[in-house]
Amino acid sequence: MSAGLLLLPDFTLILLGFAIRRWMGLGDHFWTGVEKLVYFILFPALLVNAILRTRLDFSAAMPLLATALGAMAVGMALSWLTRPVFKLKPMVFASIFQCGYRFNSYIGLAAAGLLFDTPGIAALGLIIGIAVPFANLTSVWMLARNSEAGVWREVGRNPLIWATLAGLLLNLAGFVPARPLEIFLGRLADASIALGLLAVGAALRLQGQSGVKAASLYLGFVKLLVLPATAVLLGTWFGLTGTYFAIAVLFASLPTASSAYILAMRMGGDGQSVAWIISATTLASMVTMPLWAAWVVS
């Protein structure tokens, strides 16, 4: 089976989450609870478990991180053009600016595990540990003029960063978990993928602001096509091969993170426009991600 078709079950789970949200009447409170469970408990357990179980090659990880951060930097530069080109209001621009480079960790970790098993999750976990602070610092800084939220508070409360750091420290210390602890972490990790993808689907919004549709199409093009192409070029230049090369391109091809909406709303931004872009890139990535995956894995 091709790598592209392997991603079909993950995207089917996203669509199932969308359907459940619309037709089962579970309510916003239920989905808020699911998102918190996945974000604060299940996905951190997935990262710690994967990093603990993988022999990490830090010499190869440096080009991996350079490729990922380089692709993000290109996304930031191209996203900056939305304000002068599309004549956006300051807070609209500050809100949707982040949609050109932020990434959905839920989809990424699910796809990495499906395509490359534990080593793929560990490799993406390394990127997440570095890229999340980078993305958050830039996004919060852009919105900070109209909010009292602190940059370092947003970064410091991110459980994925702490889980990555904990996994790395335990890995370097040679920690081997006892069998019951290993099973416990494994069970949490297994639960994270399905619930995380269902939560992504439940968060989809299909109505957006008409005034940002052109900018949305541009940002979607940047996020889903330009960034992975940039990762291909940078990864080749840095000499990446195998799993690390594929993970770098997979990371760059991810749709915009749902946390971009939360940040925009928390800091008084244009949450509706951000929600539309998140939904549009998530749906479009069901076509683009399998194509990138099939190309880099072949």
Image: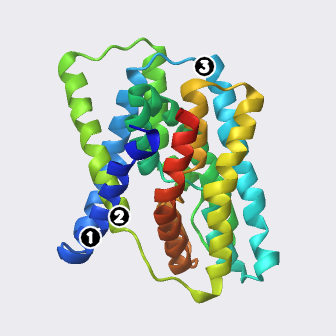
Please name the residue that numbered disc 1 is placed on: 19
Q: Secondary structure at mark 1?
A: helix
The amino acid on which the numbered mark 2 sits, given as a three-letter code, is Gly
Residue 93, image quadrant: bottom right
Coordinates of residue 155 in the picture (x, y in percent): 55, 50
Q: Quadrant of the N terminus?
A: top left
Asked whether the viewer can see residue 208, the reply is: yes
> Which residue shows up at 40% across the image and 70% down it?
204
Question: In which quadrant is the C terminus drawn?
Answer: top right
Q: Are marks 2 and 1 in contact (CB under 8 Å)?
A: yes
Which badge, 2 or 1, comes first in the chain's sequence? Answer: 1
Tell me which numbered mark, 2 or 3, is placed earlier along the sequence. 3
273 relative position to 67: left or right: left
Q: CA distance from mark 2 to mark 3?
A: 35 Å
Please state the horizontal and vertical placement of residue 291, each as a whole percent of the image. Answer: 54, 49
x 60%, y 19%: residue: 58
Q: Which residue is mark 3?
A: 58
Q: Look at the numbered disc 3 and give the secondary structure of its residue.
A: helix
Return the residue at label 2.
201
Colour convention of the picture: rainbow
Residue 21 in the image: above or below residue 115? below
Farthest-out residue, top: 174
Categorize mark 2 by other alpha carbons within 10 Å: few (<14), some (14-19), many (20+): many
Number of the front mark, 1 or 3? 1
